[in-house]
Amino acid sequence: MTAAMGARALRQWLPLAPALAFLAVFFVYPLARMLALSMEAPEGPFSYYASILASPVYMTVLGLTFKTALGVTVLCVVLGVPTAYLLASLQGTWRNVLLVAVVLPFLTSILIRTYAWMAILGRNGVVNQLLLRAGLTEAPVRLMHNELGVYVGMVHVLLPFMILPVFSVMSAIDHRLLRAAESLGASPRRALLTVFLPLALPGIASGALLVFLIAIGFYITPALLGGPKQVMISNLIEVQVTELLQWGFGSALAFVLLAATVLLMLLFDRFLGLERLTV
Amino acid sequence: MRTVLYAVGGLSLVFLVLPFAVVFPLSFSASPYLEFPPAGFSFQWYARYFASAKWMAATLFSTEIALGTTALALAVGIPAAFGLVRRPFPGKGVLMAFFMAPIIVPYIITAIAVYFLFVRLGLVGNPLGLLIAHSLLAVPKVVVIVAAALKGFDRTLERASLSLGAGPWMTFWRVTYPGIRPAVVTAGLFAFLTSFDELILSMFITGPTTVTLPKLMWDAVRLELDPTIAAASSLLIGVVVLILGTMEALRRKAGIRVPVS
């Protein structure tokens, strides 16, 4: 390598160096250590993983995590696509005002939003107080510490992640295409389903995949709004590490979750491109 | 068909703002417990929040950590964005994915990995540990936001400046930086908010003398639903609204794109 080439390489890598070093030391290295820890079981390198597969408890939690993530994703599609459609068909002030309704929750911390839902759904929460006062029920109804609470909380947190990418794709669709379809004899409904929807599909797919990806790693919402039967894999990892002090086993569980995340991410990149992760 | 879509969309928007419509009134309640609709108007919960040494200490501490995180994340992230966008050879995609990894990997995984490392380094319960952990999540956002702005920056302006005799530093400060300043401000706001709201990593690495605001809220929420939390939440939402207003102004002026997670 000549000196000039060396200088050029240095110029290209130098600005990247601090960030690369920072991530290498505090992100890659700890993850590698954790992987090693997950294989340091006394009974052999894969025994923690084998016991996850063999244990009905862990498999149930894993199954529940994926089931919940899938359910939340379906709900986000069902609610988010019409919302994006509504926003995209508006213009000017109304569009901006209603966009705030999406972006404000998006920027507010999950903890605050989950707290608000606890105040709404709790035993002495807003809904129960209103129900009791209206005489519709005699005893408080159980609205949280169950599946309902988890779904409400998670959909609330994840809905903006669905709406924003779909909205951004939908607002770029040329509405003359719809008018062309209608002028050629398609009913408004048919134009919507056969012209508009296929064009919006990349946005819907990236929103749905993103929601699912974030949902499988959820911790705060299931911990506060769920009950003992709504434990997700993140909660299980936390318990293993902080309460049971099973670092190796907790690490193995974390790597199962990480593998699922990486797999989904590769799918995302393959079909949609990582650059879609901005709005 | 259209009517149904509009109705579902409208209801979803109501669902999205509902928690805000409840927390604000609750925070001004005159009642001694969570009562809705609130029985009267008072500032008692705000008074209690501002009078509480515990809440004030956590707010101050979180602000300090968030400011430190903003500085560190910008210092590390801005050069990285330059290196990434102005890299002539391939491999950009892989590098970008690498830089985004900390905000894509579920936080609980990063949290325990960092916790194991910090236990050995003695960084648990240490402000430096929080600064590092929060920066881990803030750097990717800074890189994404600044890189997006740099991609849209017209480099002929720089060449013009250089050809007219300005040196590289002068060109950077007088031409490039003013062009990407809205993105840098947005990135800084995101970095601040990332740290200020961070809970999952903090849960593992805060100690008795390094309690952040989200950690204190987490403990308070789990113990009892004291309306002081409603007051603290409303103030935090106020901070978010301010930041949102600033970002919206910048977005309109400069078309900044922000990362989604």
Image (cartoon, rainbow, N blue to C red):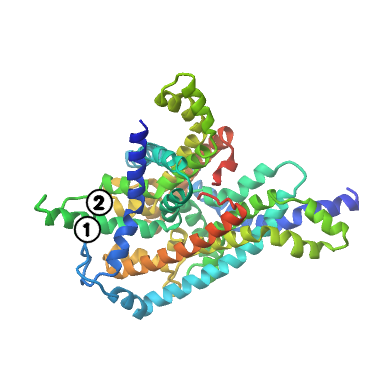
Q: Amino acid at mark 2?
A: Met
Residue A273 drawn above or below residue B196: above
Helix, strand or loop for disc 1:
loop
- Left or right of B41 in this view: B4: right
Residue B122 appears in the figure:
no
Residue that label 2 marks: A144
For label 1, the crowd category at 10 Å Cα-Cα, with few meaning under 14, some 14 to 19 and many 20 or more, is many
Residue that label 1 marks: A125
Q: Residue at x 25, y 51 (%)?
A: A144
Residue A56 drawn above or below residue A250: above
Residue A49 placement (x, y as % from top left): 45, 41
Is label 1 on the same chain as label 2?
yes
Residue B69 placement (x, y as % from top left): 56, 66
Residue A176 placement (x, y as % from top left): 53, 30
Residue B11 placement (x, y as % from top left): 32, 44
Count the marks. Answer: 2
In the rendered structure, find residue A2 and report the number of the disc placed on it. Answer: none
For label 2, the crowd category at 10 Å Cα-Cα, with few meaning under 14, some 14 to 19 and many 20 or more, is many
Q: Amino acid at mark 1?
A: Gly
Instruction: List the single residue furthest toward the front.
Output: A183
- Left or right of A43 in this view: B227: left
Residue B196 drawn above or below residue A79: below
Cβ atoms at labels 1 and 2 below 8 Å apart: yes
- Left or right of B30 in this view: A20: right
